[in-house]
Amino acid sequence: MAGAGPDIRGIIANCLTPFDRDGQINFDALQHEIDYIIDVCRADAIAIGASEDAEYTMLTTEQRRDLMARGTAMVGGRKPVILGVSHPATQRAVELAEHAASVGADVVQLLIPIRLWGGDPEGDEIYDYVAEVARRSPLPVSVSQNRGPGADPAIPLFLRIADVYNVPYLVETSGDVTKISRLIEEIDHRGAARYFTNAESLLINLTLGGSGAAMAPPAARIGTEVVRAFREDDLPRATEWQRILSLFPNRWARYGAPPVMKAAMRHLGIDLGRPMRPYDSLPKWDDAQIGQFLEEVGLKEPGEEAPGPAAALGPIGLDHSRLQAEPLPRRSRK
């Protein structure tokens, strides 16, 4: 494999960034979230400030560096740590990678950027950017594709990037089955890099021989069950868990990931605050529906939320008897 790094397979949990009422990072809430990811989600790695749903673009440079250092310390070596270093300027990304190494991270993650002044970047522009950061980074690099805030390269460019030394992981979120199957064959099976997709594509990825998926909590809790059932050759149980991921969080996708996932975490007893202003939280009915959904699929203990204007049913005909090979881990409420 190109470059060294932990042998990460399964679920990469994209840690959300908690904010207090003044818009500052709430590090007490971050500790609760990290413990939940490790103890309840049982993710295979934890990414901090690394994905766009972590709202890292809303942070100052000092806030971002502080989040990297204190988040890594909170993990305390319990799981591999991936720290985000994404920045459209090569030098800034390299400086963040150096900081990540200094605070004890295992891997850094880099978003394939858009061309900020307009137009899609050419393949050589993207390749040169990734290769330069990877060459200068003191840590292995996970390269992330996220259409919208980042560029969306064609398959041949992904194959070139996978061969860059010091890039042992690729996270690709298109959900395009044609692209997924091709990249698994030519990246993961070839041993060029570990190939990860998004939550909706997790079981497809695993079935075809890919490495797993990246997602925020509490979806990471569901994803872990998909991976566990798949590894135990229990495809019916893996399928039932994947059916839940087909609706959560996408049923509320119009609001974006941070409001939906933060609402879900609050229903599970971990208050991560609201998204960074000027962006807003969910309307109360959708918020209540998310709580009901989590309760209906067995992730949340029964609550008192009022029903929304429409039913918040989980997957129709979900076979709950297949979901639990053992009692679901619960967060300790101290």
Image: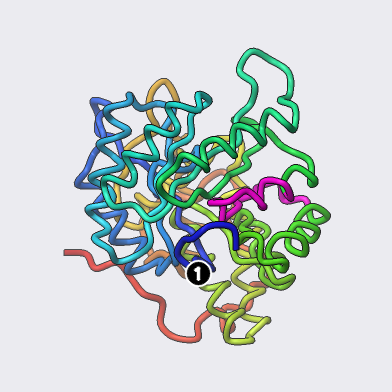
Does residue 285 appear anywhere in the picture? no
Q: Position of 278 compared to 212: left or right? A: left
How many numbered marks have been drawn onto this rendered protein structure?
Answer: 1
Outermost residue on the top side: it is 117
* Residue nearer the viewer, 226 or 98: 98
Q: Which residue has dot 1 on it? A: 224
Question: At label 1, which amino acid type do we have?
Answer: Thr
Residue displayed at 43% across by 65% down: 43
Residue displayed at 44% across by 55% down: 217
Relative to 332, residue 131 above or below = above
Relative to 319, residue 86 above or below = above
Q: Position of 309 compared to 287: left or right? A: right
Q: Position of 52 compared to 246: left or right? A: left
Q: Position of residue 280 (x, y in %)?
A: 44, 28
Q: Position of residue 39 (x, y in %)?
A: 32, 69
* Residue nearer the viewer, 278 or 44: 44
Q: Position of residue 99 (x, y in %)?
A: 31, 39
Is residue 51 magenta-colored?
no
Residue displayed at 53% across by 68% down: 9
Secondary structure state at the residue bearing disc 1:
helix
Is residue 175 magenta-colored?
yes
Outermost residue on the right side: it is 178
Neighbour tally class for label 1: few under 14, some 14-19, many 20 plus, Cα within 10 Å: many
Relative to 275, residue 36 above or below = below
Residue displayed at 16% across by 64% down: 334
Which residues are the magenta region? 159-176
Does residue 71 appear anywhere in the picture? yes
Relative to 109, residue 22 above or below = above
